[in-house]
Amino acid sequence: MPDRGTRSKMTMHTLRTAALGPWAQAHPVLKAQATLALDLCLPVNPEQILQAPSAGPGRSAKPVLVPHTQLKAKSMATTEGRAMLVHSIAHIELNAIDLALDVVWRFAGMPEAFYTDWVRIAQEEAKHFTLLREHLLTMGFDYGDFPAHNTLWDMAERTQGDLLARIGIVPRTMEARGLDASPGVKNKLISVGDHRAGEILDIILAEEIGHVAAGNRWYRYLCGRRGLDPVSTYAALIAQYDAPKLRPPFNMAARRLAGFEEAELAALS
Ligand SMILES: [Fe+2]
Ligand SMILES: [Fe+2]
């Protein structure tokens, strides 16, 4: 029979505290592995208020982060050019692991299904990162070999004080932009014969639709709880948080599957 102190420590080990482990892990491959190892059967403890062990998620020294305007693309005809594109997507996926885990530990007071949804999403992001990194290795490169930008994490920081803003903007704007970008990126890579990259992007697109759908579902839940209109609130959030403006072409089919309503799709054009 554990004594009182041990027992309270044991009850403190929850899905939400466990999410802090891979969040704080700096090594990208270990971060992905630790995320995949998270046990969805752990108790959630939605009301627990948690503190992060560090100011931000764990990051290795590479890739070097630069403003996104300093990132230059190279010709897709070269292996290096293709690798740079695959690397940039791998970087987004690594950030997406942290974004999903961050939602799990940082924001208390949601239903248990909210937390398990976001742990599952983090695990899919870890799979996406791993697939892309393994593909990079076959090209003679690794994650960290090219510079990258910090745009996604910047938006996470800006919205860390309000879950409605986080869910309204990160999955429904930043990840939804990934749905829009996917067909063009896939065409670029398969047009130079990289069919494996095309297959990986198909897997990612199918699962990203699910992530944006979860974003839509929980965004509407939060709007409902606060008595807010989802469409006008979204426009207000975009302005308040200076979120990136959405530009065509839009992947309307994927956006419909992800649960955007006709009024929201009409507001895009
Ligand atoms: Fe992903
Ligand atoms: Fe995602």
Image (spheres, rainbow, N blue to C red):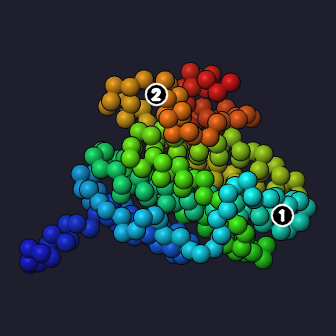
Could you tell me which residue is drawn at 58 percent across and 46 percent down?
175
Q: Nearer the viewer, residue 23 or 4?
A: 23
Q: Position of residue 268 (x, y in %)?
A: 64, 27
Label 1 Cα crowd, 10 Å radius (few <14 / some 14-19 / many 20+): some
Q: Is residue 157 above or below residue 26?
A: above
Please tell me whether mark 2 sits on a helix, a strand or a loop. helix
Q: For this view, does 72 lie left or right of residue 5?
A: right
Label of residue 81 in the image: 1
Closer to the eye: label 2 or 1 = 2
Instruction: Report the residue marked by disc 2.
Output: 233
Measured as percent of width and height from the top left, residue 102 is found at 42, 57
Residue 86 picture quarter:
bottom right
Q: How many residues crowd around disc 2 within 10 Å: few (fewer than 14), some, or many (20 or more)?
A: some
The residue shown at (24%, 56%) is: 48
Quarter placement of the N terminus: bottom left
In the image, what residue occupies the spot 85% across and 61% down? 74
Could you tell me the amino acid type at mark 1?
A: Gly
Q: Nearer the viewer, residue 234 or 68?
A: 68
Please state the horizontal and vertical placement of residue 206, each as a whole percent of the image: 62, 47
Mark nearer the N terminus (2 vs 1) = 1
Front residue of 250 and 58: 58
- Looking at the rendered structure, the kind of residue marked 2 is Thr
* Res 41 visible: no
Kindly state the secondary structure of the residue where label 1 is placed.
helix
